[in-house]
Amino acid sequence: MSEDVRPRLSVVIPAKNEAGSVADQMAELDRVLAPLAPFEVVYVVDGSTDDSLRELARADRDWLRVIVHEESCGKSAALLTGIRAARAPIVATLDGDGQNDPAYVPALVAALESGGPEVGLAVGQRTRRGDGPFKAAQSKVANRVRRAILGDDTRDTACGHKVIRRDVFLRLPFFAALHRFLPALVKREGYGVVHVDVIDRPRTAGASHYGFLDRLSGGILDLAGVWWLLRRRRRLPAIRYDG
């Protein structure tokens, strides 16, 4: 895509060591996103040590842009890098493992746009997951606890399927697990959140980068931090200039 053509939609994909999913994911995006053209895909390689860059070079799409973190900084940092680089006012996010079916992106974009400017985020909520039963059970418990504490009215914040207004994302406070708390933080900024049911697919290549203890130890502190942020938000004054 020409640099002079501003995309309608940017798709940001944060990924670490997901070379095995690149070819199929790019082919799917080529087909599914055609109705949303002009679009771009910003693929952030987060310190990968596999053949991700080689596979991305083979993909050879004019709408594909690749950004590399020399060292892995985590999913939220990769999202921030990608969304800062995005050229469209609306950004869709997908995980790089291929479990998020891009066929749902148009529905998420439509849900966001139909809500008007007061809606800042459309969230995919999985009705069926491609993970095993143990991981699904972990997520179910974590989501219930999070909803009870934060009151974000979102059943599944960990789903990679999200569509957000770029300017709204860039207002949010950044921390390492930002991507898990987007609904609560977007509401904190005064914007609405809408939901679209999606179905995840099983992983066909690579391995998960998250373990149970990693999620538990960091998740408790992050939840407490977001709870504090929500209660420290104060309404900003309306300003009028006379003369």
Image (tube, rainbow, N blue to C red):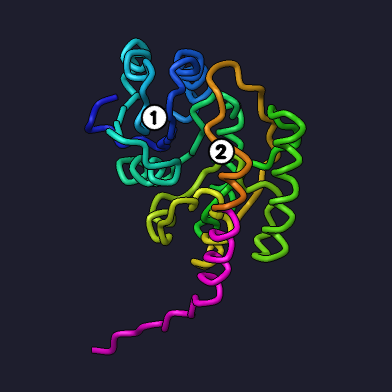
- Give the residue drawn at x 32%, y 19%: 53
In terms of depth relative to the viewer, which is nearer, 76 or 161?
76
Q: Please provide percent x and percent y for residue 167.
A: 39, 55
Residue projecting furthest to the bottom: 242
Q: CA distance from mark 1 to mark 2?
A: 15 Å
Up-down: is 138 above or below 5? below
In terms of depth relative to the viewer, which is nearer, 195 or 82?
82
Q: Looking at the rendering, which quadrant does residue 147 occupy?
A: bottom right
Q: Please provide percent x and percent y for residue 113.
A: 54, 47
- Give the residue drawn at x 55%, y 24%: 207
Disc ID at residue 77: none
Up-down: is 199 above or below 75? above
Q: Amino acid at mark 1?
A: Val
Q: Is residue 17 magenta?
A: no
Report the magenta residues as a range: 219-243
Up-down: is 33 above or below 20? below
Q: Secondary structure at mark 1?
A: strand
Report crowding for label 2: few under 14, some 14 to 19, many 20 or more residues within 10 A (C-alpha): many
- Give the residue drawn at x 56%, y 33%: 105
Q: Amino acid at mark 2?
A: Gly
Whether pointer 1 and pointer 2 mark residues with C-beta atoms closer than 8 Å, the reply is no
Q: Which residue is mark 2?
A: 160
Q: Please provide percent x and percent y for residue 150.
A: 64, 65
From the viewer's perspective, is the residue at label 1 or at label 2 nearer? 2
Mark positioned earlier in the residue sequence (1 or 2): 1
- Give the residue drawn at x 49%, y 48%: 164
From the viewer's perspective, is 140 left or right of 166? Answer: right
Q: Which residue is mark 1?
A: 41
Q: Please provide percent x and percent y for residue 22.
A: 45, 18
Q: Quadrant of the N terminus?
A: top left
